[in-house]
Image (tube, rainbow, N blue to C red):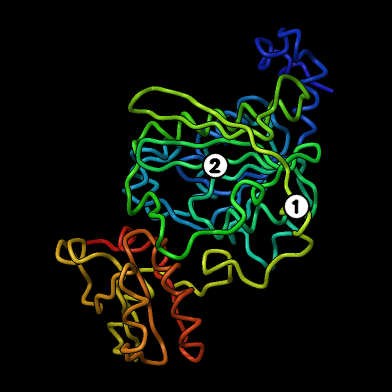
Amino acid sequence: MLNKAEKERYNRQVILPELGVAGQEKLKQAKVLVIGAGGLGCPILQYLTAAGVGTIGIADMDVVSESNLHRQILYTSEDVGKPKVRVAIQKLTQQNPHIHFKAHPEGITTENALDMVKLYDVLVDGSDNFPTRYLVSDACTILQKPLVFGAISRFEGQLSVFNHKNGPSYRCLFPEPPGAGEIPNCAEAGVLGVLPGVVGTLQANEVIKIVCEIGEVASGKLLLFDALSLSFSSFKFPRTAQADKVTALQSSYGATCAVVQTISADELKAWLAQDKQVQVLDVRELQEYENFNIGGELVPLSKLSDKLATLQLQPKVVVHCQSGVRSQKAIAILQERYPEVQFYNLAGGLNSWEH
């Protein structure tokens, strides 16, 4: 039941006849897991918190970096270097003290996905990489949990809802993931700062409709948004046999979904200062490397597969890029070729390196 303070806070929402007190109480009882507290995650979390979703889980293993701030509006310059989950919960609790937050700073992995997903009623995918999207999708398909999907790149965004009342799954639309490096992420291709605000807000809207059982949910429909032309378009797609093929999680979805050893910038500096036997690989592009580097060997992710056979690796290797995303992809490729090497990912990439 809503208490007096909640009735006052949510008054303008409760007076909507389509939602009412019953809808607001459904929101209070709902448990929603948001994967990613980045560009999409910030508006998703802020609007779900404001709307009164009773329990909100946040899964993200990243730290705030300077390059996040133009689009991840939950954070400020003072938060750079801090874990996103911790900062997000602190600020969202100030926004609405009636919400219960659950922190998942380890992120979502093949080892914990099913146990994590089964705790929630609705999942929201705010991730920025394909391995995580397929892992989350498969877990939701297995457990029959509705999944609100969003994706952004440059000036374009996508939105859909999967597994809603036996509707299509993510694999019905995208049966197989692209190869490593085939499609650039935001760190590589760039993204307009306001774009995740638009798409993330639409994702929050879908969550509210699912929980309150109102309106027409975007199940079996992919919405496309172009910020440059300010245009929306959509097309429908059916449930296919792909959804029925998913009965168990794969052993690996790539480095971003596997348990990858990480090292902080301070830890790496200490290792280098102590002259420990550690090799540093920089998987950024040449222009980025020439702008600033920490002396690592340059092996761009875009050329990594071609250079695998000629690499001479030490037993312990730290891989880094600018933000920590491309380096995870590189580790997935390297681990398959060099299983005997101990790889570490520099958490937050060079964004966490003070220079």
Q: Quadrant of the N terminus?
A: top right
The image shows residue 145 at horizontal and vertical percentages of 76, 45
C-beta proximity under 8 Å, tags 1 and 2:
no
Q: Can you identify the residue that label 1 sits on?
A: 241
* Quarter of the rendering containing residue 76: top left
The image shows residue 334 at horizontal and vertical percentages of 44, 80
| Residue under the point 66% across and 46% down | 57
Q: Can you identify the residue that label 2 sits on?
A: 90
Q: Camera-side residue: 241 or 265?
A: 241
| Residue under the point 33% across and 54% down | 188
Estimate how packed mark 1 is, as few (under 14), some (14 to 19) or many (20 or more) residues with alpha carbons within 10 Å: few
Q: Compared with residue 68, is residue 192 higher up or lower down, i.e. above or below?
A: above
Q: Compared with residue 97, is residue 243 higher up or lower down, i.e. above or below?
A: below
Q: Considering only order in the chain, which callout, 2 or 1, is on the residue closer to the N terminus? A: 2
* Quarter of the rendering containing residue 287: bottom left
Amino acid on which disc 1 is placed: Ala
The image shows residue 9 at horizontal and vertical percentages of 66, 16
| Residue under the point 73% across and 30% down | 210
Amino acid on which disc 2 is placed: Gln
Q: Compared with residue 21, is residue 349 higher up or lower down, i.e. above or below?
A: below
